């Protein structure tokens, strides 16, 4: 079934309740003919970690918000939920929802894993906006997937904003890349789907020869490939990282 504004595919995006980054960055990355519809995941839990667990526990209910819309892929716009669920449970839930709905579920965590494997990257650096405990948890997630985390930069956040991660300026995210300059890395991953990363990546798609990617960039790339039925390709991914397609759209919005 063809949708008027999505002749090449419609993606159902699941976004945390107060996240202000997922939808704008998705729209920038989507190529002509591919569109998205969004559903918000909600939780009344008091802490960040508890909300992330809650989002994952309620994925079946969240997916039902798309009802019978003709989506070709589901994108989970949170990475922290994958860290806390763990590799085994994430794989189990992704498989179960894919089997039940008939469309692939692309998590931000597994999108990064796919991108790193596509580039044959093993030694990685991370730029993290998370609290220290969640950063430590995420290191275990990447290492269980077979990567060596060889550099960690912790981005400072402010507690007097509506959300410590979602209110981080892109300039702060970009400064985190400076601290990984000079390290021998295969790739750098900027974490957190709520931290704006497209502008920093467009400005610096490589640091010391290591491609720079983010959870949102990987989620967009993997979801677009999934909805169009395309296989991962290293050359196409490197072009995507450089913003060959989406860069002009970001600049047209007056962001970069």
Image: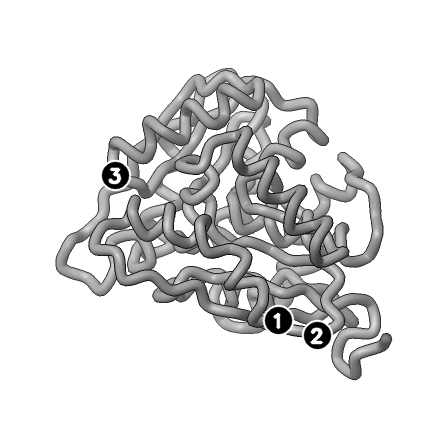
Label 2 sits on residue: 69
Q: What residue is drawn where x is 63% and y is 65%?
A: 12
Could you tell me residue 215's position as x and y percent? 52, 45
Gap between marks 1 and 2 measured at Cα: 6 Å
Q: Earlier in the sequence, mark 3 or mark 1?
A: 1
Gap between marks 3 and 1 measured at Cα: 32 Å
Q: Earlier in the sequence, mark 2 or mark 3?
A: 2
**Could you say which is closer to the camera, residue 214 or residue 91?**
91
Gap between marks 2 and 3 measured at Cα: 37 Å
| Secondary structure of the residue carrying numbered label 2 | loop
Q: Could you say which quadrant of the image residue 136 lies in?
A: top left
147 vs 244: above or below: above
Could you tell me residue 81's position as x and y percent? 43, 44
Say whether marks 1 and 2 touch (CB < 8 Å): yes
Residue 168 in view, yes or no: yes
Residue 256 in view, yes or no: no
Sort mark 1 into few (<14), some (14-19) or many (20+) by Cα contacts within 10 Å. some
Q: How is the image coloured?
A: one colour
Q: What residue is drawn where x is 29% and y is 59%?
A: 167
Label 3 sits on residue: 131
């Amino acid at each position: 079934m063809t949708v008027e504004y999505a002749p090449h595919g419609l993606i159902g995006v699941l976004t945390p309740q107060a996240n202000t980054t997922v939808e704008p960055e998705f729209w920038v990355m989507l190529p002509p003919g591919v569109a998205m519809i969004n559903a918000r995941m909600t939780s009344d839990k008091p802490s960040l970690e508890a909300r992330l667990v809650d989002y994952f526990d309620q994925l079946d209910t969240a997916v039902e918000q798309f009802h019978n819309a003709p989506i070709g892929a589901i994108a989970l716009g949170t990475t922290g939920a994958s860290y806390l669920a763990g590799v085994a449970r994430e794989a189990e839930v992704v498989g179960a929802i894919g089997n039940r709905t008939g469309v692939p579920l692309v998590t931000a965590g597994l999108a990064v894993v796919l991108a790193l494997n596509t580039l044959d990257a093993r030694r990685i650096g991370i730029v993290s906006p998370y609290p220290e405990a969640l950063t430590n948890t995420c290191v275990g997630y990447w290492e269980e997937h077979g990567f060596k985390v060889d550099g960690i930069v912790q981005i400072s956040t402010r507690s007097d904003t509506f959300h410590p991660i979602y209110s981080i300026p892109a300039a702060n995210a970009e400064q985190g890349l400076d601290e990984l300059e000079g390290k021998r890395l295969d790739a750098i991953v900027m974490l957190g789907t709520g931290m704006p990363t497209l502008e920093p990546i467009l400005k610096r798609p490589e640091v010391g020869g290591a491609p720079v990617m983010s959870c949102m960039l990987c989620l967009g790339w993997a979801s677009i490939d999934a909805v169009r039925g395309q296989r991962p390709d290293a050359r196409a991914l490197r072009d995507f990282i450089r913003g060959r397609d989406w860069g002009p759209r970001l600049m047209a919005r007056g962001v970069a």
